[in-house]
Image: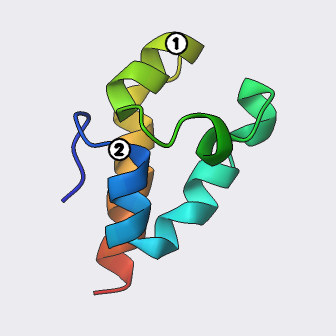
Amino acid sequence: MITEEMRILDIVETYPQTESVFSSYDEMIGKCMMCNHLFDSLAEIAQAYHLDSKELLLKLNQIIAKDQ
C-alpha cells in the first residue's frame, strides 16, 4: 500500500505500473512530475501543487491493486 510519506522514486521502483498515474499529472502541474520530484514525498508534491492527495493516493493504490 502506498502512503503520503513515500517518495516517488520508491513508489515507481516498487510499483512500475504507477508511472502512468504520475504522468497523468504532468500537464496539470506544468512539468514532468517524475523528472522533477523523484525524491519528494507525495504529501510534499500535493502541497506544492495544491493537488488532492487523497485522490492521488486512491489512483496509485487502485492501479497496484489491479495488478495483484
Image quarter of residue 13? bottom left
Marks 2/1: CA–CA distance: 16 Å
In this rendering, the answer to whether 3 lies above or below 9 is above
Q: Is residue 7 left or right of residue 16?
A: left
Where is residue 4 shown, x and y percent of the image?
Answer: 26, 35
- Quarter of the image for the C terminus: give it: bottom left
Determine which residue is flagged by label 1: 48
Image location (x, y in percent) of residue 52 = 46, 25
Q: Which one is in front in this view, the residue at disc 2 or the one at disc 1?
A: 1
Residue contact at pointers 2 and 1, CB within 8 angstroms: no
Q: In the rendered view, tell whether residue 2 sits above or below residue 12.
A: above
Crowdedness of circle 1 by 10 Å Cα count: few (<14), some, many (20+)? few
Pick out the residue farthest to the front.
Answer: 39
Amino acid tagged 1: Ala
Q: Which mark is residue 3?
A: none
Residue at 64 percent across and 35 percent down: it is 36
Residue 60, percent across and down?
40, 56
Quadrant housing residue 30: top right
Q: Quadrant of residue 19?
A: bottom right
Residue 63 appears left or right of 3? right
Q: Which residue is mark 2?
A: 57
Quarter of the N terminus within the rendering: bottom left
Indicate whether 54 appears above or below 23.
above
Q: Mark 1 or mark 2, which is nearer the start of the sequence?
A: 1
Front-lying residue, 38 or 51: 38
Describe residue 22's horizontal placement relative to residue 11 as left or right: right
- Could you say whether the residue bearing mark 1 is in a helix, strand or loop? helix
Image height check: is 21 above or below 14? above
Dot 2: what SS? Answer: helix
| Amino acid type for the residue under numbered disc 2 | Leu
